[in-house]
Amino acid sequence: MRQFDHSRDSDGNILGAYPLRSTFIYPTYSLVWVDMIADYYNVSGDKEFIHTYKDGIVNTLAGFEKNMNELNLVNKTPYRYFIDWYTGPNNGSGTATKNDGENSAVVSLHYVHALQNAAMLFKEIGNDLTSLVYQNRAEEIKKSVYDLCFDMETNIFAERPDKTIYDQHTNIMTILTDAIHESEQRALLDKILNDKDLLQATYYYRFYLFEAIKKVGAPELFDVALRPWEKMIEDNMTTTLERFESIEKPTRSEVHPWSASPAYFYFNYLAGIQSVKNDFEEVRIAPAFGKLKTMVGLLPTSKGTIEFKLNRTKNKLSAEITLPNTMAGNLSWQGTEIPLKKGKNVYGIKNEIK
């Protein structure tokens, strides 16, 4: 994060690879840098860290704002708005539109996502005015995306206002940014996963799909989103590919860490192990089994390794959890909260089925 901050150019762009002699800029990656700051803060709770990068956040978002047009959607830029390695006839070399990203709803929503994270960060350090500015700008863009790109007949968002291209990516981001009302998000998520006519999210972008599943609270859909990795195993892969294999675009890399997001969500979402204070000084464990009955694992953290064995039968949870001596936490199950002590914890929780 520090090196990306050092790489920023005079227009607020973060270099996609740094240090590098050539200029390697994807404006969407600049937005992801803001998201990285928010992710780090959510794990660490370090407000001084926000202060270190607050000027960079302002500079980066001001630079991206110059890309917006009168529709509150993005314009073309000299650089490429990379979203994903789309496959099929609409492949646009990393953008869905084949028109250099002009009026792209998904790129505009990534800007919203960064604005929302920035609003949270500035609120945390007491800068309510800047936080409100970012919140209001995010709301304006969300409204434009809904008004211009939502298809009332299919109840799916198009990738741009001419409604010629539909992809999973745009619809995933409408859920993550609340561009569609919370009450409609689960139905949209089902469409995202079942409409095969949508341009499909590949390994990298399914990080956001898993986030949407987590946000909506639908762990039973996790294995549906996971199917491309099952295909990897069938193909005898032992490391993760960069993108979907196809005749027109074979994968360029067979050892690509951006495709490893299931390894994160197994622990963070299904096992439900999350830091709530100072990078795992305190944890909350709230399992969301989905279609699983048993989960066993080890999670290395900066404060030591968490060991767990979780088993559920209908309304009962059996849990064996061992925390390192530097850690405290709580176990949460169907409304019941139980404190976890250092060392080994063994609990059985049974709740009435409602």
Image (cartoon, grey):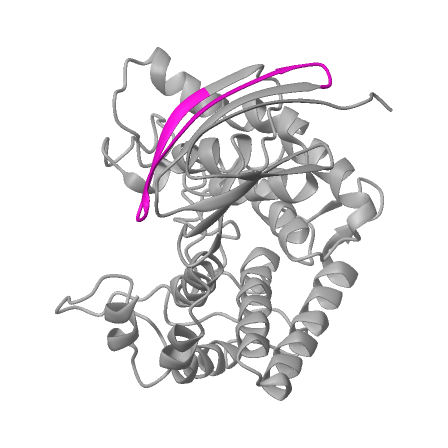
Where residue 350 sits: x, y (%)?
72, 21
Where residue 253 sits: x, y (%)?
23, 35
Residue in front for this viewpoint, 267 or 147: 267
Q: Residue at x 51, y 49 (%)?
A: 96
Q: Residue at x 80, y 53 (%)?
A: 181
Residue in front for this viewpoint, 216 or 86: 216
Where residue 109 sits: x, y (%)?
60, 61
**Residue 90 visible, this orientation:** no
Above or below, 111 against 352 in this view is: below
Does residue 342 appear left or right of residue 129 in this picture?
left
Which quarter shows the C terminus? top right
Magenta segment, principal secondary structure?
strand
Q: Residue at x 37, y 83 (%)?
A: 11
Magenta span: 296-315
Q: Residue at x 40, y 46 (%)?
A: 327
179 in the magenta segment: no
